[in-house]
Amino acid sequence: MRSEAFKRWRWEALPYLLYGAVSYLLFVATFLYAIGFVETVLVPRNVDAGGLDAPLGAALLVDGLLLTAFAVQHSGMARRGFKTLWTRVVPAPVERSTYVLCTSASLLLLFYFWRPIPRVIWSVEAAGPRMALLSLSGLGWGIVLLSSFLIHHFELFGLRQVYLAARQRELPRPSFATPLLYKLARHPLYLGFIIAFWATPTMTLGHLVFAAGTLGYIAVGIQLEERDLVRDYGAHYLRYRQRVRGLIPLPRIGAERPGPSVQQAPRSTGTATRPPAPEPAGYRK
């Protein structure tokens, strides 16, 4: 019995499993640092302090370039054309893990080179409202985490792909699903980030640049992602889009009832869909 189980392992693919695990753990550490960076707690460099001082113009330029570099990496590597070329260089089972690793690297560079601009835009000093804003920001981070698990967390971050490759199994075809938060908004993961970034009792100019820059990236990312979804799933996704708002979790008046289930898969950006046929390279963004 045990020998049969060992035979099912593709031993030459075990380095993929190790690579995927390291990439995932690095991303978890990066994500935790990101919380401290935005909330300005427990980390040596955050959005308001710890970085090198710079004149206002230079700080705006550097921070803008860092946000742009992250947006290009995070969105560009998720496009189908790039992935087709990229999987000629990296093995298909680790494509997603490599994407996750590159995302971690781009975020860490942003954290390290960020130039704080501590000029205060608003500050809420009253204890009650201040705690309410901090709680709302915590809720945003919770929505991000929950959304990732609703769309298969371990596949989203590449672990499932490398595990199945090591077990000589293909990524199964998932069915279309709109679990929990996805019944309320098409992009709850994006929504969680927006809440986390904007619900702050002390908004500095640097924090405002960060929040506005990421909001702009999210707006563009949604357009790119939904263009791909409409191209892939046509009327099925159009009906879902008519029925459910993108970010605001309020029902559409007069929206049609849900259509029949179709085969789809999740994206890293937070929508609960993926291509109808299994992709050995893993998720599209």
Image (cartoon, rainbow, N blue to C red):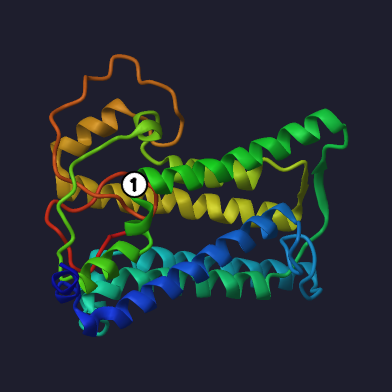
Q: Which residue is mark 1?
A: 151
Viewed as shown, does residue 64 lie left or right of 185? right
**Residue 245 quadrant:** top left
Q: Nearer the viewer, residue 216 or 275?
A: 275
| Residue 155, position as x, y percentages in the image | 32, 58
The vertical placement of 189 against 244, above or below, is: below
Q: Residue at x 34, y 29 (%)?
A: 183
Q: Residue at x 86, y 32 (%)?
A: 127
State the residue lying farthest toward the top: 254
State the residue lying farthest toward the front: 1
Q: Nearer the viewer, residue 213 or 191?
A: 191
| Residue 143, position as x, y percentages in the image | 51, 41
| Residue 255, position as x, y percentages in the image | 27, 19
The vertical placement of 172 against 77, above or below, is: above
Residue type (three-letter) at the residue carrying disc 1: Ile
Q: Residue at x 21, y 20 (%)?
A: 257
The vertical placement of 148 against 112, above or below, is: above
The vertical placement of 70 against 201, above or below, is: below
Viewed as shown, does residue 198 lie left or right of 283? right
The local secondary structure at tag 1 comes to: loop
Q: Is residue 123 visible?
A: yes
